[in-house]
Amino acid sequence: MVRDQLPDGLLGRRALIIGGAGALGGAIADAFRAEGAQVVLADYAATGDDADSVALDVRDAHQFVPAFQQATHLLDGPIEILVYSAGTIHRAPTVDLALAQWQEMLQIHLTGAFLACQQVIPAMVAAHWGRIILIGSNLGSKGMAEFPHYCAAKAGVLGLMKSLARELAPHNVLVNAIAPGPFESAMVRGLSASERAGNEAAMPIGRFGLAAEVAPTAVLLASEPGGNLYVGQTLGPNCGDVMA
């Protein structure tokens, strides 16, 4: 293939970003649009009345089918790129963690990702092209005290990603993950001043990241030819917190 025949990044691609109202989901949406992609956001905070958003509470399995049908309608075609960025975080010692809190964390991060992937796989396989990007976390690899449910959910996301990557790669549907370190978001803003200072000091670059600094990794994985050789990989824009 000569240079003039190479695919043009994300131009014209149809993307759905779940958790699009969050800092990272919003930054990825902006980055995708800047590359010429059509983008629809799905989020529990969305009203579903906008031309580029659908309402989806990932804690409710019954909402996935109608939400994805609406997203496909808004995009005027099957979803080609799925980014699953829904998330929440909560701190509790293991002995104090309620079962309902454990189950909700896994539902939002892991079960929701599974249900979302189920919705897009058939059309991607039929088209022999697709990109699925699951948002993990550095804590899914390194762990952290008093976040057992969050760490377990994010580790599960990476396991799900690897299984899907092996299953779908023969169909040219490439599945990967991004495992960010701490970046400026509502979650980080909930830290006390001393916690923040300590965590920032532990970063090799001496600071937290920005969502806009994570988003280009999603552009790379979603694009063609940029993402063509990434299969079952976890990319870590994590300020050097985890070095693999």
Image (tube, helix red, strand yellow):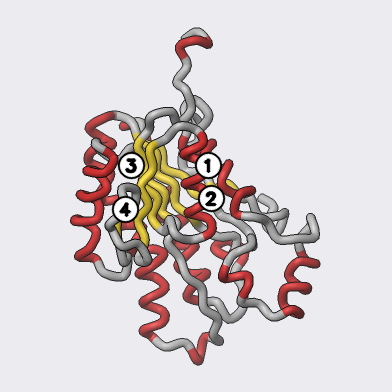
Q: Secondary structure at mark 2?
A: helix
Residue 62, placed above or below residue 25: below
**What crowding class fits label 2: few (fewer than 14 Cα within 10 Å), some (14-19), or many (20 or more)?**
many
Residue 94 seen from this side: yes
**What crowding class fits label 1: few (fewer than 14 Cα within 10 Å), some (14-19), or many (20 or more)?**
some
Instruction: Residue under label 3, please give it.
Output: 167
Q: Nearer the viewer, mark 4 or mark 3?
A: 4
Q: Secondary structure at mark 4?
A: loop
Q: Quadrant of residue 142?
A: bottom right
Instruction: Residue under label 1, please give it.
Output: 31
Q: Secondary structure at mark 1?
A: helix
Residue 81 seen from this side: no
Residue at left offset 36%, top offset 84%: 100
Q: Nearer the viewer, mark 1 or mark 3?
A: 1
Residue at left offset 37%, top offset 52%: 41
> Left of 87 or right of it: where is 55?
left
